[in-house]
Each structure stands twice: as C-alpha cells, then as structure tokens.
Amino acid sequence: MPDDRPSIGIAADSGATPGADGLPRAGPASPGADGRPGAGPALPDAGGPPGARPVPPGRDGHPGSRPIPAGVVGALVGFVGSSTVVLTGLHAVGASDRQAASGLLALCVAIAVTGAGLSLRTRLPMAVAWSTPGAALLISAGRPDGGFAAAVGAFLVCGALLAVSGLWGTLVRLVSSIPIPLAGALTASIVLPVCFGPARAIADVPEQALPVVLAWGVLMLVARRLAVPGALLALVIVVAVSGDLHLGPASELWPRPELTAPTFDAGALIGIALPLYVVTMVSQNVAGVGVLASFGYRAPVRPALLSTGLGSVLAAPFGGHAISLAALSAALVSGPDAGPHERRWVAGVANGASYVVLALLAGLAVAFVAATPPVLVQAVAGLALVAALEPALATAFTDPEHRPAAVATIVVGASGVTILGIGGAFWGLVAGLIVHVARTRRAPRTA
C-alpha cells in the first residue's frame, strides 16, 4: 500500500534499519498488550547469531531474585489468567468438554516443549504462551459451518502460516504492511465484545458477579498481576458457596488427548485461520519481541516463529488453536525478578517446564467451567482481556490520519456479523483497509 505513514513494519522515529533479509531491526520498545514495555514497532531482523545486548545499569536483577521461581510464577499467571478465555473460545467454535480439555492439554505440552527448547538452545529467556487474543477471536467467530473439525482445519492452517513466516520473510513483511493503528483496531474489535461479559453478568446475576468484579477491581489497584487470578479465585468461592460446584468423578478430571480429524472449510479458513494468524503475529509475537528487547535481549525471530508454528501445527489436531511468543509471561521471565541477566534463560526453561504440570489441570479446568454458569465464565474471560483492550484502543486512535480506518475496523469487526460464512474480524480488517486505501489515494489530490 503506498503510504508513508507508520506501519507495523517500520514505525516513524523508530530508528529501525533493514536487516540482511529485508526485515527491519527493532527500534525502541513500546507498551505491550499488558501495559508493560512490549510491542516494538517491528519484528527485529533474525539474521546473525542471537545474543544479549549490553544491559543498562540496574538490569542485573536484585538481591533475592531467582530464575526458577520467576519462571514458575510466569507460567501460573499465564495459565490461571487466561485459561478461561481459551476454554470459552474452544467451546464457542464447537468443541465438546473432552475436546476442549484436549485442546488445553495440547497447548500446554506445545508451550512446554517449545518454550523450554528455545530457552535452552538460545540461552535467552524465551517465554511461549497460547494466543490469548486468538482465543478471543474464537469467541467472536462462533461455531463454523463445519463444526469443530473445520475449526481444527483453520488451526492447522494458522500454525502452518506461522511456521512459514519463520522461513519466508515476505510473509512477515506482508503482515507488517498493515498500519499499526489498524492492527490495534483489529485486536480491539476482537477483544471488545468479550469485555462486555462482566457488565452482562452483573445485570443477570449481580449477587454472584459483583464479588468477582470487585475482587478484580481492588487487585487492579494494588497488585495488577494478581487481578485476574484473584477474580478467578473469587469465582471459585462464589460458585462453591452457591452449592453449584459439582465437578463429577475424579476419573473424569484426568485430561486425555482427543484427536479430531480436520476438515477445510472456506468460511473457517478465511474467517478464523487468517485473522487468527494476523492477530497472533501483531498482538503476541511482535509484543513478545518488544518485551525481550526492553530488557536487553535480541530475540531470534526466525527460530521462534518456526518453532511456535510447528508447535501449533502439532497441537491443532488435538484442539490447540495457536501458540506464540508470550508478552506478559515474557515480562516476568526476562525482567529483574528473574535474576542476573545472563542467567534468566533458566527462567525460560522453568516457565516451559511448569506447563508440563499445568497440563494435568486441563480436565479440572474444563470440569469447573462446565459446572459454572456460562455468564460468570464469560465475565472472568472479559476481565482477563481488559488489559489487552486498553492499549489496543490507544494504538488504534493514536494517529488522527488513521482514525477513520480504525473506527471502520472496530465497528465492523465487533459487530459479530457473518457474511458468506466468514466472521466479523475478517470483514472488519477488510473495511479498515478499504478506508485506509481510499483515504491514502485521495490525500494527494486534496493536498
């Protein structure tokens, strides 16, 4: 697109320079989806040997910091904070309870293998996570015409695109050509409908929803990282006190792999696979690279994309939607709490290894969700995504020149409309790009 305004590829004033493969090197980091130093304007060049850059004073950790506890805490925060979003998304696209448990199990195993493997290989704190914005996309997309099998086919294609991105820089540059405000608007359009969940829950079941929302609100003020886990704990207490918590026999709580043969439906591929790939790239991978850069690490982008893409492909037949570089977990694993700078890769290994244990909780998590009123599960999922909505909206409306396109993306994407069997996220991005191109071509004539 002929536009000299900033895009994901190279942002204005970023100081980014082209790498050996044509991809830009990272400029200064900007806030990620969790409000911490996060998504830089570009994926850095993967050429050359990866390694740590010189670290400014004060980044070598503080007394008492340890890499293994930091890695474990990062995994716990990631799992507890967004597993409800993942399960809600899998159920929304047609997964049964067993298929959803299998999907969560597969995601945990894929995260464990890729995260620990990348950290060991690169000696960098490479935290991997499932795509939380991608799970929110599944909630808004709903059940495709081909059912869960069509969704699994879309997961496979998304994983393949992520893997190909690690080998073919042109695909990354194509995604990077999307202007930054439209990328933020796409994320906002996906996350916004889910964030209505708490308000709906308060209106429907105020006596149960209010304690959950209040717990989240108080913790947001005093301990932001604990806000979503605290809301989930409040939900457990509320459901237990109400007498509705019946998890079933212990034998049903053990997660089992459930293989689903994929089918490839055009509507699911366009409405789920492509938006899932784009939102995972711009909201997760770019943010994860930015977090690492903010703590003095140069991420090996190509190996990371290839590894997480292959991990996504292997997890897809068992119900896993996508894994990627982490943002919030990356901040916990690569920050000062993870110990001396040169030893923080151990936190990355510990973070990955922790998911082996967390995988065993997949059946329990699904049983709890099944025993909880759906409106309350959706409320916690919405609370978990509020932290992603705020920076997405800020990014969408930063540049006045891109605001009309951003508004079009959000309005159409969040509408929930389905046309030709394709969900709103795709049409939102199309609408935004049409407005963007129209305004770009009109600008020289009106100057």
Image (spheres, rainbow, N blue to C red):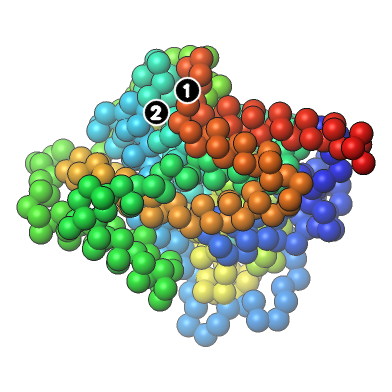
Residue 120 appears in view: no
Q: In the picture provided, is 337 more to the left or to the right than 83?
A: right
Give residue 234's position: percent from left, percent from top. Answer: 24, 62
The circle drawn on residue 418 is 1
* Residue lying at 72% horizontally and 38% vertically, measured from the top left: 178
Residue 141 appears in view: yes
Q: Nearer the viewer, residue 143 or 317?
A: 143
Q: Amino acid at mark 1?
A: Thr
Residue that label 2 marks? 142
* Residue lying at 51% horizontally and 53% vertically, measured from the top left: 388
* Residue lying at 40% horizontally and 16% vertically, measured from the top left: 145
Q: Amino acid at mark 2?
A: Gly
**Residue 310 picture quarter:** top right
Q: Quadrant of the C terminus?
A: top right
Give residue 206's position: percent from left, percent from top. Answer: 21, 55
**Residue 343 picture quarter:** bottom right
Above or below, 356 relative to 166:
below
